[in-house]
Structure formats: structure tokens, C-alpha cells
Image (spheres, grey):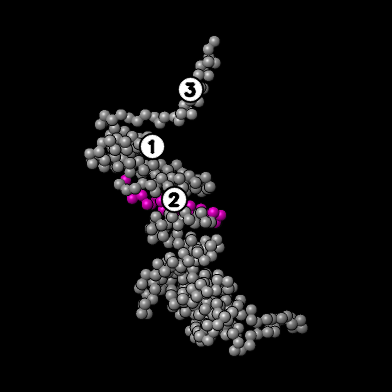
Amino acid sequence: MATAARRAIISGFMLCAALTASTGFAQQTTFELDPERGTWVQSEAAEPGTDAWVIAETRRALAAGRPSEARTQISDWIKINERTDNPWLPEAYMLRGDALVAIGKEYKALYDYERVALDYPQSEVFLPTLERELRVGRMYLNGLKRKFLFFRFEDASPIGIELLMRIQERSPGSQLAESAALDLSDYFYRVRELELAAEMYGIFLVNYPRSQNREHAMLRQIYANVAQFKGPRYDASSLVEARALIGQFEDEYPDRAEQLGITDALIARLDESAAAQMLATSEWYLRRKDPVSARFTLRRLVIKHDGTVAAARGRDMLEDRGWDMPDPTPLPEELRTLREDSEAAAAGDDTP
């Protein structure tokens, strides 16, 4: 996986370098239409030896697939200008980072990218640099190992996580930050860090309520909460959260909920799981010689999850021990008074 990931990251950065070369070089080269020949001719180019010419030549070397040459050329220029306020410095650091990535030294490239992100947030290459960090972070989360002594064997996922977190902090509300947030949520879901996944999807939905990926995030948040339930002997609070999320999803996407079965069928399964957890709790109380807590839990089970298999078993346990069955849930005082008034009025109407 690491080899494939490395090939993908190098290919991506070479394409990015080619685009940078084609668009960036045009900033130093001007073309005009020759009316007699009907063709575009170059009217202005960067003077050889100037800063603009060095930047343009570096882009050209990257686009031509010569990253080592590009790295050497731009590094020599940076050594001369790094302590100045030269306006080309941000782009120079970004280009050297691109060259390092292209030769398989993406971790070292992060130093140059971070230099741009920290020292030149107002530059035109700030967001393109963050895009490059996002690409490196994705590759690390997808299995690319960090290189050490010419071999890739060190897990780099913590670096990938940090990169995606930084991108969200540095460009809040942007499309780039949204992509980073969703990628990070999907990563936690993929590696079965379900509690973190559910939390990250929740944050994503709050920060990007109109995202085109909202349905995806809501579904994953539901599944992450459901999957956290490990069985009747464990905490069932995630099931309560999942049930509330299902109701919200059904309100927003009723057709999709019906298509996926995110309706009564799943809610019934959640009820059965929650009921089984309460039944296991009551049995634990009985083993602990705590009949008061056991009876209380069984009564709650019968009231809250009536109709489930666990509730039927709980009702049998109450009867076997001679414990009274729970009364129907009483009406609130206001509703009880209203019902009594209605009944009295109806009785008065029937009186001759």
C-alpha cells in the first residue's frame, strides 16, 4: 500500500507542479496577437538571472519532470534571499516543497510548506500550499509510511491527523477546511475509532450545515453510534443518541431513510438492544443481592421498551418474584384535569 500511495502522491504533485508552471509562468511572460500572421507571439519575458526568471525556470523544471534540478536551483536562490523581504520567497518555499515531494521526501517538504503557512498567510500561494499539505495528510492517513533511513516503516497517521486539523484552523469555513474535516471523520470511521468518528461527524454537521456531504455525514454518525454498542453488558448511551439522529435524518431525508431502512426497522433493533442491556443490568443487580435496584430496573424496562423480547422476559421475572407490575404511565396534571373536565361536560350533555 505504501508503494502505491507514494506513486499516487508523486503523480499528484507532478501534476500540480505542471499546472503551477503553466499558470504561474504566464505571469512573467506576455503574449500578443500578431494581426498579420494571426498567431500569438511572445512580447515580454523575464530577464535571465532575475528573481522572476529563477522562479519560472524552477516551475519549468518541475513540469518537465526534473525535480532534483528544480530543488537545487531554487535552494541556491533561497539561501541568498531567505533573510530578505523578497516577495518571491513564499512561492520559492512552495516550489522547493513540491520538488522534495516529487523525489519522495514529502516529510521534509512539510517544513517548507509550514514556513509559508506560518510566515506568509497573506500571500497568493497560502491556499495552494494548504492544498499540498492536505494532499500529504491524506496520503499519510491512507497508509503511506514515513521514510527513515531510506525505508518506509514508521506510521505517519498522527502527522496526517495533525495536518488536517491545522488546515481547518488556518482556513475556517473554506472548501479546503470542509474537505479536511470530512477526510478526518472518514479516517476515524475507517479505523474503527467510532467515538471520535461520531464526534467529528457531529462537528462537521454543525460547521457545514449546507454541505453537499451532509447526508453522508449524518448516516456515518448514525452508524458510528450504533456500532459503539458492544452488547447488553455495556453502556447503551450511544443507542439513545443513534435513535435521536435517526429521527433527524428521517425528517430531512424521508425518501432516502425509507430506501436504506433507516426507519422503524432500525429503531426496533435499537429498542431491542437497549432493552437487552437493561435486562442484563437487572440480572446483575440480582446477582449482587440488590433486589430493590433489580425491581426498579425491570419496571423501567417494561415501561420504556414494552413490546420487546427483553421486556417480556422482564415481565416474567417480575411475576415470578411476586413484584408488582408497573402502572401505566400517569398523565401529567394538566392533561388529567382536562380529561376529567371533558368527561364531566359529556356526562352533563347526556342528562335529560
Residue 91 location (% of width, % of height): 55, 78
* Residue at 50 percent of width and 66 percent of height: 167
- Nearer to me, 10 or 234: 234
Marks 1 & 3, CB-CB < 8 Å contact: no
As shown in the figure, which amino acid type bears the numbered disc 2?
Ile
Q: Which mark is residue 192?
A: none
Rounded to the nearest angstrom, the CA distance separating label 2 from label 3 is 42 Å
Q: Single out the mark in the foreground, 2 or 3.
A: 3
Residue 255 location (% of width, % of height): 52, 46
**Neighbour class for label 1 at 10 Å: few (<14), some, many (≥20)?**
some
Residue 302 position (above or below residue 241): above
Q: Tag 3 or tag 1, which sits nearer the N-term?
A: 1
Residue 243 position (above or below residue 119): above
Residue 117 position (above or below residue 310): below
Q: Which mark is residue 222?
A: 2
Residue 167 among magenta residues? no
Residue 126 position (above or below residue 331): below
Furthest-bottom residue in this view = 49
Residue 229 among magenta residues? yes
For the N terminus, the image quarter is bottom left
- Nearer to me, 264 or 133: 133
* Residue at 52 percent of width and 66 percent of height: 170
Mark 3 highlights which residue?
A: 340
Visible residue check, residue 35: yes
What is the span of residues highlighted in magenta in the rendered image? Answer: 209-232
Mark 1 highlights which residue?
A: 304
As shown in the figure, which amino acid type bears the numbered disc 3?
Glu
Visible residue check, residue 15: no
Secondary structure under badge 2? helix
Furthest-top residue in this view = 352
Secondary structure under badge 1? helix
Q: Quadrant of residue 282?
A: top left
